[in-house]
Image (spheres, rainbow, N blue to C red):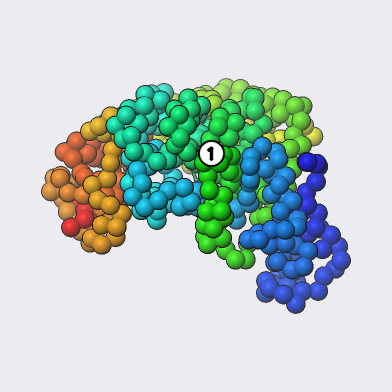
């Protein structure tokens, strides 16, 4: 197929050039009801009028744009998503799993995966990730743990993994997929952070090229697509295409955003047009930036498997403090954790400039007043009672029927957690809704609190030393 084409983008542009008069939704009428600075947004925000096709039943330009996407990623079929990888993950799970199925899931997954498991009413077997001892973050899925899980639970019907993680770290996915396929088990991948892996070297291999059956990618995270623009790819006949489409139709808006869809067409084209020269330039600019930043006293730049991710550490500052320093000079990182900030770099074309030098100058201009002896958070490595897998004690149906109450930490031992609690570090849920709380959990919870770890999830009454359980 001709990857120079941008069928949807071109059609919308052609529509605009005809100076259209809108007697259709949306109510801003091609932006004319907006004040002038907002006009350009409105001009792109169209609807399913003649010639602009329909995402839910594509026959014209959207069909062609999606075919070009499938052609570039070499898939059986690919789809535009207008509600992010969130909706893709939900559709992926609902279409692939039946109620009561045993499903192997990486414990540190995105909440959309957990929500998908709940909606599909499956029986998740959570796989405990290994920890990267240098970065103090989960380091992905371990092959031995997968082998152990397949032996312990021969009835597993699907695997759901995240590849890469937020920091761009990858793992031995190819062997894991082979192992699953030997048992005819489909592997579903949340590749939210890897839409650009299609480029190949120097980027890690993509989940699709490693043989994953279905993959969802947030094009908006690393490609030039608008927020909420994602791709879903089907790559094998282990996946029921009609079921995926059935759920996408149910879960996505009946008024899909044209700006998002146009940007998805554009992002696919952008990726297809990137030359070796562009990629070399991107890497050279990144390497210079990395080197100059590394010369700032106290700063150390850790590399990830994905060259677009830089993990920045400061000798005397926590990640959160470092983020606050950067923000003082209007440099906004993607995220901070107790030890690092994460920067996500752009995929550049050779004729583009990005203000890397300006960023380093601003960083150099900061007066880095730091406490010499920082109260370091001790690096708690979470130990689950079973080193490989954990199961839920209640089904999702039972959880929906039971009520919650908050009780003291020690009283909670032996009860079933009603909410999730995720300590940072290391960003792996200590317990998930439906999991039995053990003495080990409570010992670790107290240790984590004492060491200054931060928490997400069931934090409402954490200061009062209470957690929610089902009763
Ligand atoms: C691993 C992972 N999966 C899924 C998502 C959800 O993606 P989206 O924002 O495209 O809905 C995120 C968002 O950060 C994520 O980090």
Where residue 97 appears, as percent x and y from the top left, is 42, 48
Answer whether residue 372 is visible to the viewer in this image.
no
- Residue 3 against residue 316 in the figure, above or below: below
User: Total marks drawn?
Assistant: 1
Where residue 414 appears, as percent x and y from the top left, is 15, 45
Please state which of residues 119 and 468 is positioned toward the viewer in this rendering. Answer: 119
Q: Characterize the local packing of mark 1: few (<14), some (14-19) or many (20 or more) Cα atoms within 10 angstroms.
A: many
- Measuring 70% from the left and 38% from the top, which residue is drawn there? 72
- Residue 175 against residue 64 in the figure, above or below: above
- Measuring 29% from the left and 57% from the top, which residue is drawn there? 397
Assign a secondary structure to mark 1. Answer: loop
Outermost left residue: 411
Corner quadrant of residue 103:
top left
Q: Judge from the rendering whether residue 41 lies leftward or rightward of residue 449; answer left or right.
A: right
Answer whether residue 183 is visible to the viewer in this image.
yes
- Measuring 44% from the left and 37% from the top, which residue is drawn there? 185
Residue at image mark 1: 213
Where residue 313 appears, as percent x and y from the top left, is 47, 29
Please state which of residues 112 and 280 is positioned toward the viewer in this rendering. Answer: 112
Q: Judge from the rendering whether residue 458 lies leftward or rightward of residue 469; answer left or right.
A: right
The quadrant of the rendering that contains the C terminus is bottom left
Q: Judge from the rendering whether residue 406 lies leftward or rightward of residue 358; answer left or right.
A: left
The quadrant of the rendering that contains the N terminus is top right
């Amino acid at each position: 197929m001709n990857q120079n084409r941008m069928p949807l983008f071109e059609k919308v542009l052609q529509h605009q050039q005809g100076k259209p008069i809108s007697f259709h939704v949306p109510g801003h009428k091609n932006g004319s009801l907006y004040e002038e600075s907002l006009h350009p947004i409105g001009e792109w925000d169209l609807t399913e009028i003649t010639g602009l096709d329909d995402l839910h039943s594509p026959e014209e330009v959207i069909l062609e744009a999606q075919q070009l996407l499938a052609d570039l990623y070499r898939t059986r079929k690919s789809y535009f998503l207008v509600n992010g990888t969130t909706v893709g993950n939900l559709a992926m799970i609902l279409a692939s799993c039946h109620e009561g199925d045993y499903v192997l899931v990486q414990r540190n997954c995105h909440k959309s995966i957990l929500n998908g498991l709940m909606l599909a009413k499956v029986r998740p077997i959570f796989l405990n990730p290994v920890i990267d001892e240098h970065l103090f973050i989960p380091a992905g899925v371990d092959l031995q743990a997968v082998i152990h899980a397949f032996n312990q639970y021969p009835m597993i019907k699907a695997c759901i993994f995240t590849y890469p993680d937020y920091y761009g770290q990858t793992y031995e996915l190819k062997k894991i997929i082979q192992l699953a396929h030997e048992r005819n088990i489909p592997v579903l991948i949340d590749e939210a952070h890897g839409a650009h892996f299609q480029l190949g070297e120097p980027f890690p291999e993509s989940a699709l090229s490693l043989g994953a059956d279905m993959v969802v990618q947030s094009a908006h995270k690393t490609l030039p697509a608008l927020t909420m623009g994602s791709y879903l790819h089907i790559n094998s006949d282990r996946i029921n295409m009609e079921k995926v489409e059935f759920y996408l139709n149910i879960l996505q808006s009946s008024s899909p955003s044209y700006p998002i869809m146009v940007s998805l067409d554009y992002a696919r084209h952008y990726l297809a047009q990137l030359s070796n020269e562009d990629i070399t330039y991107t890497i050279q600019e990144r390497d210079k930036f990395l080197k100059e930043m590394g010369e700032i006293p106290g700063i150390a730049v850790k590399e990830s498997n994905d060259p677009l991710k830089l993990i920045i550490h400061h000798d005397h500052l926590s990640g959160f403090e470092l983020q606050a320093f950067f923000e003082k000079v209007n440099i906004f990182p993607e995220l901070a954790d107790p030890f690092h900030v994460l920067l996500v770099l752009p995929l550049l074309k050779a004729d583009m400039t990005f203000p890397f030098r300006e960023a380093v100058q601003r960083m150099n201009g900061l007066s880095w007043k730091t406490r010499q002896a920082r109260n370091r958070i001790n690096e708690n490595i979470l130990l689950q009672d079973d080193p490989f897998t954990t199961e839920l004690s209640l089904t999702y149906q039972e959880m929906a029927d039971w009520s919650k109450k908050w009780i003291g930490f020690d009283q909670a031992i032996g009860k079933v957690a009603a909410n999730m609690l995720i300590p940072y570090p290391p960003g792996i849920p200590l317990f998930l809704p439906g999991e039995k709380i053990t003495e080990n959990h409570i010992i670790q919870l107290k240790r984590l609190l004492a060491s200054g770890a931060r928490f997400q999830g069931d934090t409402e009454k954490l200061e009062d030393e209470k957690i929610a359980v089902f009763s």
